[in-house]
Amino acid sequence: MIALRVLAGLFFTSLLTGCYLNPFGDSGKQLVDDVRTLRENLYAKPNPCLPPGAKQTQKCFFSLTITDPDSEGSLVRGHVSTKACDQNHNSGNSSLDCTVDYLYPDYYFGVKGNPTLKRNADYDFDSEPGTDILVCRDINGQPTTTDCWIRDRGLDTVTAKPSQSATKMSK
């Protein structure tokens, strides 16, 4: 019994350290790859941006679809644009199906300057650090309080640079 515990401990230690032992063929390789991905995600820095409408600690970008331009007095209601899901899919998350997996909740948020926003239109916003208010962008991507640009095209695809931890693990 002790020998089985030691063997199990060695096996899981080798998985967690990234050493490749292949006692199970291709499924063993997949298990090692999954553990490496999990470890990289655990050590990754968390996203400091909070959902729209929350007090932000830094400048954050949001692409939002307006579902109710004046739902709670001075607050606007909206959710993350499907264009953001499409960007995520096109940027390397090919298993993401935006027609099925897209289930973002609605958020209530204030918009600086009270510009006219259209229902079911997509807009780009920046947060103001230290506040819960968003500022919309004009057609040139600059902050504005009056002439918000309706996003009529998808978001640019992002090409990820290999992380330092992934480089270390592959050596």
Image (tube, rainbow, N blue to C red):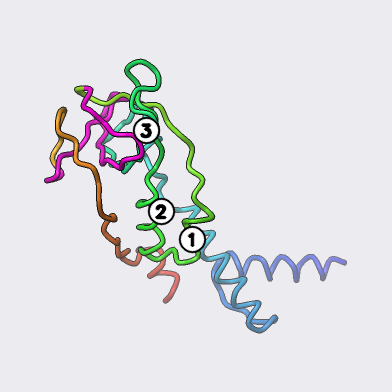
How many marks the image carries: the answer is 3
Q: Earlier in the sequence, mark 1 or mark 2?
A: 2
Instruction: List x then y, in percent, for residue 12.
Output: 67, 66
Give the CA separation, mark 3 to mark 1. Answer: 22 Å
Amino acid tagged 3: Pro
Instruction: List x then y, in percent, for residue 154.
Output: 29, 56
Q: Earlier in the sequence, mark 3 or mark 1?
A: 3
Q: Give the prevailing secondary structure in the magenta stretch.
A: loop
Residue occupying image coordinates x 49% and y 60%: 97
Q: Disc 1 marks which residue?
A: 96
Amino acid tagged 2: Cys
* Contact (Cβ within 8 Å) of mark 3 with mark 2: no
* Contact (Cβ within 8 Å) of mark 1 with mark 2: yes
Q: Nearer the viewer, residue 33 or 143?
A: 143
Secondary structure, mark 3, is: loop
Q: Disc 2 marks which residue?
A: 85
Residue occupying image coordinates x 43% and y 53%: 44
Instruction: List x then y, in percent, for residue 127.
Output: 27, 33
